[in-house]
Image (cartoon, rainbow, N blue to C red):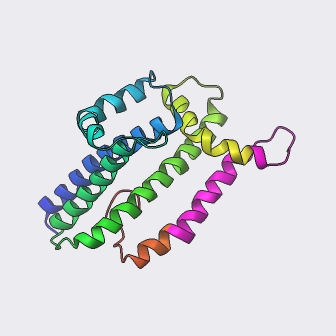
Amino acid sequence: MSPIASAGLLLINAIGGLVLLVFLLRFLLQLVRADFYNPISQFIVKASNPLLIPLRRVIPGFGGMDIASLVLAYGAQLITMALIMVVSGYAVPWMNVLAWAAIGLLGLLLNIYFWGGIIVAIASWIAPNSYNPALILINQILEPALRPIRNKMPDLGGLDLSLFVLLMAIQLFEILIIGPLAATAMMPRGLGIGV
């Protein structure tokens, strides 16, 4: 691969990944009813509004979910994957890419929860009770997933293993569901963000 193609792939992955992350986080922030006065939330809102507000006129929300931001995230994943294939010199098999984009989006969603959990675990050791805006936002995103696990777990004398259970469940889901889905769809490794 030529240096120009390698540089193009780097830019596509970086910019496509950032845009995809912004749209997917916008979906999650709305879903968990996160604090929109958080500076990071404000950035995500301002970065996503130019495309999201017009799309919301066409695609309404459903059951408290911001479907328009999810559609934008899917579109960003689709475009990123197609551009990666074009720059790599391959024809774009659109029917396959439609499935690959959905698998990649689900993989990124799991990665957000997994790495968010790792960040929270490390921060609890080195900066407990921190008021960092990023940590507050990560906790707000993780809490709806942790609460049902915490409620089902037996009393362990003040030891909360719900985060450990969530991280193990994410890993199992990736091994048992995402991996076979990607293999069934014949998804090339490293094609897009999230998988």
Answer yes or no: is residue 56 visible. yes
> Where, by quadrant of the figure, is residue 83 drawn?
bottom left
Q: Is residue 167 left or right of residue 62?
A: right
Q: Is residue 134 above or below residue 77?
A: above
Answer yes or no: is residue 190 visible. no
Give the position of the C terminus as an image quadrant: bottom left
Q: Is residue 126 above or below residue 82?
A: above
**In this picture, which residue range is highlighted in magenta?**
151-177
In magenta segment, residue 156:
yes
x and y percentages locating residue 133 in the rendered image = 49, 26
Give the position of the N terminus as an image quadrant: bottom left
Task: Decide whether the magenta segment is chiefly helix, strand or loop.
Answer: helix
Camera-side residue: 88 or 3? 88
x and y percentages locating residue 119 in the rendered image = 55, 41
In magenta segment, residue 6:
no
Q: Is residue 87 left or right of residue 144?
A: left
Which residue occupies 27% across, 50% down? Answer: 16
